[in-house]
Image (spheres, rainbow, N blue to C red):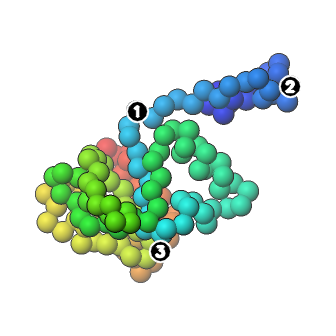
Amino acid sequence: MKEWGIDMTFGSRSGIEGVTAQPEPSPREVYLLQRKTTRVGKGLGKTTGWIHRAGLAMKGVRMMPGCDYSHIDDQGLHITVGDDTQILDVDTIIICAGQDPLRELVDGLNLPHHLIGGADEAGELDAKRAIDQGTRLAAAM
């Protein structure tokens, strides 16, 4: 509740008046990239999508639509956004590529990597399976 600025004691009017949100900053720099040029998360539920985007924004997540992924190497993730080519100096990359797994991004990569969800088996797109695989992988690390 502190993160969203909600007073559960209701000492303030409606539990929010005069209460300042105090989000805990992310310990990492996080990017959320998508190939579509539409606003990130545009297809999320009408009644809950806004809260997901707001939560990410409060954590300082850099949301970047319209990305074209080139490759991954020791320098990082090579992308192009519009006419701007850039390299994101990242140490962890999670690719959620939907029906286009883009396995070639990891061809020849000499760094530890894991393929889960659609990248592992795009023929059977199953968000529940991908979330389960990602959760298990994160818990094992």
Q: Which mark is residue 27?
A: 1
Are there few (<14), some (14-19), or many (20+) residues within 10 Å of tag 3?
some
Residue at horizontal 53%, vertical 59%?
Answer: 40
N-terminal label among 1 and 2: 2
Give the mark, 3 or 2, whose residue is nearer the N terminus.
2
Q: What is the quadrant of the N terminus in the image?
A: top right
Please tell me which residue is depicted at 16% across the width and 52% down the height of the picture.
74
* Residue visible at 45% across and 35% down in the picture: 26
The quarter of the picture where residue 22 lies is: top right
Please rate how many residues cluster around mark 2, counting C-alpha atoms within 10 Å: few if below 14, some from 14 to 19, many from 20. Answer: few
Regarding mark 2 in the picture, which secondary structure is present there? helix
Q: Please state which of the two labelled residues, at mark 3 or mark 2, is closer to the viewer.
A: 2
Judge whether 55 appears above or below 12 on screen: below
Q: Considering only vertical position in the picture, is 53 above or below 41?
A: above
Q: Is residue 8 visible?
A: no
Quickly name the residue at label 2: 13
Q: Is residue 8 above or below residue 47?
A: above
Q: Amino acid at mark 2?
A: Arg
Kind of residue at badge 1:
Pro
The Cα–Cα distance between marks 1 and 2, rounded to whole angstroms, is 33 Å
In front of the other: 69 or 108 = 69
In depth, the one of 128 and 33 nearer the eye is: 33
Please say whether residue 109 is visible from this viewpoint.
yes
Amino acid, disc 3 = Leu
- Residue assigned mark 3: 125
1 and 2 marks in contact (CB < 8 Å) = no
Instruction: Compare residues 114 and 84 and report the one nearer the observer.
Output: 84
